[in-house]
């Protein structure tokens, strides 16, 4: 059986990769992917702890996070497509003001 610390270390590495990707990249699509990576790292922690503690609470909470992440991805992709149609770029540095 794999120890709990390995799952926690993997989740910490995934979360760190997501944070680095979010802070260093200026492409809005990559920023959304990095956010999804961070959410999935948290999901891994919840599922591992839920299994370790023999409780279903973490797994149920993971389903809610997956639902929110799917909604965030759909809305974020819609915003990214709309910004690309208006500004012809997906780089955050070039989108300095939001007006209609």
Image (cartoon, rainbow, N blue to C red):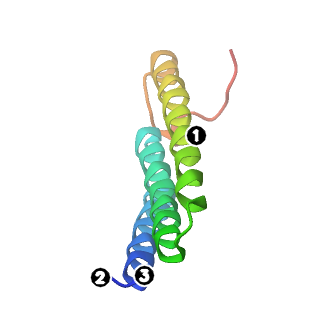
| Residue furthest front as drawn | 54
Query: Which mark identifies residue 14?
Result: none
Of the residues under marks 1 and 3, which one precedes in the sequence? Answer: 3
| Residue furthest right as drawn | 99
> Label 2: how many residues lie within 10 Å, few (<14), some (14-19) or many (20+)?
few
Task: Identify the residue position indicated by label 1 in the image.
Answer: 68
- Quadrant of the image occupied by residue 18: bottom left
**Label 2 – label 1 distance at C-alpha:** 31 Å
**Label 2 – label 3 distance at C-alpha:** 9 Å
Instruction: Name the residue nearer the viewer: 73 or 91.
Output: 73
Q: Secondary structure at mark 1?
A: helix
The residue positioned 47% from the left and 43% from the top of the image is 32
> Label 1: how many residues lie within 10 Å, few (<14), some (14-19) or many (20+)?
few
- Residue 10, horizontal then vertical, whole percent: 38, 74
Q: Examine the rendered structure and indicate whether residue 64 appears above or below residue 55.
A: above
- Quadrant of the image occupied by residue 44: bottom left
The residue positioned 59% from the left and 53% from the top of the image is 61
Q: On the picture, is 39 further left or further right than 96?
A: left
- Residue 86, horizontal then vertical, whole percent: 51, 16
- Residue 28, horizontal then vertical, whole percent: 47, 40
Task: Identify the residue position indicated by label 3 in the image.
Answer: 4
Q: Examine the rendered structure and indicate whether residue 77 appears above or below residue 15.
A: above
Query: Which mark identifies residue 1?
Result: 2
Front disc: 1 or 3: 3
Q: Disc 2 vs disc 3: Cβ atoms closer than 8 Å?
A: no
Q: If the image is split into quadrants, where does the N terminus sit?
A: bottom left
- Residue 76, horizontal then vertical, whole percent: 53, 32
Q: Examine the rendered structure and indicate whether residue 85 appears above or below residue 89.
A: above
Q: On the picture, is 96 further left or further right than 46?
A: right
The residue positioned 42% from the left and 81% from the top of the image is 4
């Amino acid at each position: 059986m794999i120890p709990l610390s390995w799952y926690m270390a993997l989740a910490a590495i995934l979360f760190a990769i997501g944070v680095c990707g979010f802070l260093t990249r200026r492409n809005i699509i990559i920023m959304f992917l990095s956010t999804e990576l961070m959410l999935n790292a948290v999901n891994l922690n919840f599922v591992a702890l839920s299994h370790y503690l023999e409780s279903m609470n973490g797994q149920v909470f993971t389903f809610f996070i997956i639902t929110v992440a799917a909604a965030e991805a759909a809305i974020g992709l819609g915003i990214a497509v709309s910004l690309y149609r208006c500004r012809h770029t997906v780089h955050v540095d070039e989108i300095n003001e939001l007006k209609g």
